[in-house]
Amino acid sequence: MAKLTKEDFISSLKEMNLLEIKELVDAMKEEFGVDPSAVAVAAPAAGAAADAAPSTVTVSIADAGAAKVAVIKVVKELTGLGLKESKDIVDNNGVVKENIPTAEADEIKAKLEEAGATVEVK
């Protein structure tokens, strides 16, 4: 039997549905006694320590701007809080969301800036 290359293996995975991939992972656990998903997660985590960029950030309001009502509506939509709680966040230049992935923070920042707010991402 010819050795399967990495490219062939990945190509085969692309053709599988989620159930087939789950069955493959379960078979690998049984055959080798190792959870391949744990290995895949552990490897990038080791390299992530070398990266300077944080993996999670906090989004807060620096200034509500002239369209304060629109900003309050966006905060209410993003957080799921009530109107009063959302208004308090906007009035006090508070934290909208914390410990979120940077991609999600960028989306939130874009929505808030579109509504007229100045946003800080830390």
Image (cartoon, rainbow, N blue to C red):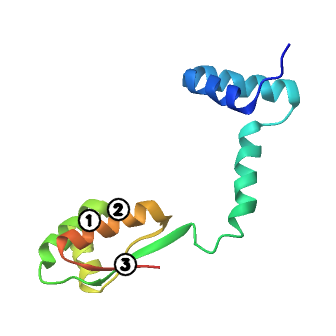
Amino acid bearing label 1: Lys
- Mark 3 lies on residue: 60
Q: Residue at x 58, y 72 (%)?
A: 53
Q: Nearer the viewer, residue 97 or 101?
A: 101
Q: Whole-Å distance between the Cαs marked 2 and 3?
A: 13 Å
43 up-or-down from 69: above or below: above
Quarter-of-image position of residue 50: bottom right
Of labels 3 and 1, earlier in sequence is 3
Toward the viewer: 51 or 56?
A: 51
Residue 58, placed above or below residue 77: below
SS at circle 3: strand
The kind of residue on which mark 2 rests is: Glu
Task: Give the distance between the C-alpha atoms of the residues marked 3 and 1, in whole angstroms.
Answer: 13 Å
Look at mark 2 in the image and give the residue it sits on.
107
Q: Are marks 2 and 1 in contact (CB under 8 Å)?
A: yes
Q: Position of residue 94 (x, y in %)?
A: 34, 81
Whether residue 57 is visible here, answered yes or no, is yes
Disc 1 marks which residue?
111
What residue is drawn where x is 86% and y is 13%?
1
Q: Count residues near mark 3 (Cα–Cα under 10 Å), then give few for <14, some for 14-19, many for 20+.
A: many
Residue 97 image label = none
